[in-house]
Amino acid sequence: MNSLSFVIPAYNEEPNVAEALGRASAVLETLHLDYELILVNDGSRDRTGEIAKNMLGKIPNLRVVENNPNRGYGGALKAGFYAAVKDWIAFGPSDNQFDFNQLRDLISESNTYDIVTGYRANDADPFMRRVNRWGWNWLVQILFGYMTRDIDCGFKLFRREILDRVTLNSDGAMVDTELLAGAQARGYKIIEVPLKHLPRTAGSPTGANYKVILRAFRDLVRFRFRLWRELNDEKKRIEPAPQR
């Protein structure tokens, strides 16, 4: 790995964003890579964007991308992904529930695998969020086969070239499934590594909103059919025309 873009999506994370950027920068500075750090302010209604912009020039290689209005978790990630210019992309949340030092554990697998996805070895979220997560992972495996035990773990690393072949449409929680299922169906190799999960100490999560969950389930079924059509179209393009 020669270069890395680290993307951090943030929505109303005023109490957390400065610490998240500081922790990410501290790790990236030790890796001796050509890197950039991208904070995506996803239409926050608090001081998240202001705090991030005030850190420009203080945090090395920091860029701030603005989504206005709010586009959702998937929309924030996509904005960061398509702004990224390095060969690899890592992303992690701004809620400080992961130890960014474990980026080294992800990078250590990058010589062999195309996507390195974490899973929460100890899930520190409240009970109902864990129940929702279990149901979601189960359904994803039914529809797409096994990719990882924790599809929506927000700390991952992947080759940027995957975005040339895998289309990400979702602005919501479906984006991780689109990335992994789309990549695996095209032959990219995925490995999962255990990550320590920390309790949230400030701010409020948004993913457990029932509207977000229902939209994600709807998008999941639609994506199953879309992926099937995409793969069939790609197969037709590469198959030689029948000779007369």
Image: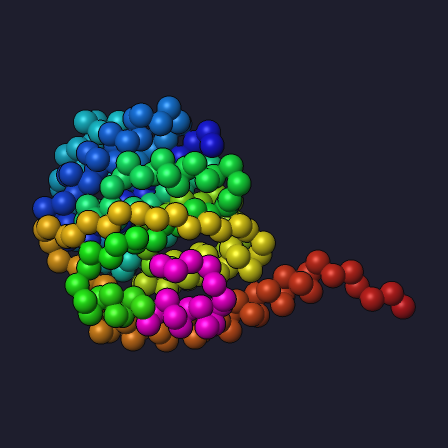
Q: How many tags in the picture?
A: 0
Is residue 117 at all visible to an observer of this figure?
yes
Q: Using the rendered view, name the quadrant where residue 236 is placed.
A: bottom right
Residue 236 in magenta stretch: no
Q: Which x, y percent locates residue 199?
A: 16, 52
Is 22 or 48 nearer to us in this picture?
A: 22
Q: Is residue 110 above or below residue 79?
A: above
Q: How is the image coloured?
A: rainbow
The answer to whether 108 appears left or right of 207 in the picture is: right
Question: In the displayed image of the protein, which residue is found farthest to the right?
Answer: 244
Question: In the displayed image of the protein, which residue is found farthest to the front?
Answer: 122
Residue 138 in magenta stretch: yes
Is 241 or 2 nearer to us in this picture?
A: 2
Q: Residue at x 40, y 44 (%)?
A: 157
Q: Residue at x 10, y 46 (%)?
A: 15
Q: Which x, y percent locates residue 39?
A: 26, 42
Is 189 or 70 nearer to us in this picture?
A: 189
Q: Is most of the magenta stretch helix, strand or loop?
A: helix
Is residue 86 at all visible to an observer of this figure?
no
Q: Which x, y percent locates residue 60?
A: 26, 27
The answer to whether 15 appears left or right of 122 in the picture is: left
The answer to whether 150 appears left or right of 13 in the picture is: right
Question: Where, quadrant-wise, is the C terminus in this rendering?
Answer: bottom right
Highlighted range, magenta: 135-150
Q: Residue at x 47, y 63 (%)?
A: 146
Is 92 or 237 nearer to us in this picture?
A: 92
Q: Which x, y percent locates residue 71?
A: 27, 59
Q: Residue at x 48, y 43 (%)?
A: 159
